[in-house]
């Protein structure tokens, strides 16, 4: 038997399957695009599974289209993160359009959480826009920011105002890397504050696509002053958690 989890996010869709021991087998990703259900159909056609659970912002659409079970992103990320790092007491998930901090009980269940989904500030979309404003590709943005010797403070967290602020700094001839470092600092200040409010102590698991950004990771460790674990594929943690919950629900675990 194989059990699948699909995370239909605002930017990408991830699909993960686990076997009857709860061990990961398949992991696929595609762009969400303008028709997430069509994209999801193409993805699930590539793997074999017996049961599936959807999570992410598009989970309700998937539930209707495929008559599947669903689970919240909070529970999915908590389950995936705690399974890989059972010593952790918190999760920080920064995705394309939202960010969330989760506090875990010792058994991995969600204790409490806080979510920012009302604006793009502090999310992957924010970083993408700032990278473009500075002439960097998203994949190189964090690496270049790490090379800066100092940072230039970015006071605006609203995406529109921050982009205007960055443009103004570029016009003044300020160093691109230092501006980039300042952008990363502004994201980490916001994320660390949210983590400290929700999960004030213990190790943290960093999930979501922004977990691939080396500057964000480095600054977060420095700001929190505690261990921050990064899964091999942080972007797939929601789908992995949903797959595990599918396995648990259908195999008597």
Image: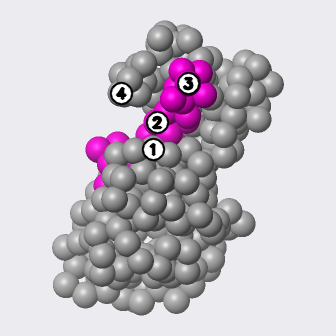
Answer with mark 2 or mark 1, whichever residue precedes in sequence.
Answer: 1
Q: Which residue is mark 3?
A: 252
What are the residue bounds of the magenta stretch? Answer: 230-253
Question: Foreground: 44 or 84?
Answer: 84
Rendering coords of residue 143 (x, y %): 24, 63
Q: Nearer the viewer, residue 229 or 191?
A: 229
How far apart are the two marked residues, 2 and 1, measured between alpha carbons?
6 Å
Left or right placement of residue 45 versus residue 174 in this view? right
Q: Earlier in the sequence, mark 2 or mark 4?
A: 4
Residue 103 x, y percent position in the rendering: 53, 66
Q: What residue does disc 4 label? A: 23
Residue 240's tag is 2
Question: Marks 4 and 1, how far apart in space?
Answer: 11 Å
C-beta proximity under 8 Å, tags 2 and 1: yes
Secondary structure category for the residue under label 1: helix
- Front of the two marks 3 and 1: 3
Q: Are marks 4 and 1 in contact (CB under 8 Å)?
A: no
x%, y% of residue 53?
A: 62, 28
Q: Is residue 237 above or below residue 43?
A: below
| Residue designated by label 1 | 80
Mark 2, mark 4: which one is toward the viewer? 4
């Amino acid at each position: 038997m194989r059990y699948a989890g699909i995370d239909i996010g605002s930017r990408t869709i991830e699909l993960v399957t686990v076997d009857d021991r709860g061990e990961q087998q398949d992991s696929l990703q595609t762009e969400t695009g303008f028709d997430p259900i069509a994209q999801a159909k193409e993805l699930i056609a590539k793997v074999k599974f017996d049961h599936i659970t959807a999570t992410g912002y598009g989970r309700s659409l998937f539930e209707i289209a495929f008559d599947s079970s669903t689970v919240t992103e909070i529970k999915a990320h908590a389950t995936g993160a705690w399974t890989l790092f059972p010593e952790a007491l918190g999760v920080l998930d920064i995705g394309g359009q939202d960010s969330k901090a989760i506090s875990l009980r010792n058994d991995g269940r969600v204790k409490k959480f806080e979510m920012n989904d009302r604006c793009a500030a502090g999310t992957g979309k924010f970083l993408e826009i700032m990278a473009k404003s500075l002439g960097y590709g998203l994949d190189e943005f964090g690496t270049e920011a790490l090379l800066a010797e100092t940072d230039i403070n970015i006071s605006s967290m609203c995406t529109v105002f921050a982009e205007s602020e960055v443009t103004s700094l570029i016009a003044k001839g300020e160093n691109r890397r230092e501006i980039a470092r300042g952008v990363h600092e502004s994201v980490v200040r916001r994320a660390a504050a949210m983590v400290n409010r929700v999960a004030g102590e213990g190790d943290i698991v960093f999930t979501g696509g922004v977990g691939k950004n080396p500057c964000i990771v480095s600054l977060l460790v420095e700001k929190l002053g505690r261990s921050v674990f990064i899964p091999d594929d942080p972007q797939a943690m929601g789908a992995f958690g949903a797959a595990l919950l599918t396995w648990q629900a259908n195999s008597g675990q």
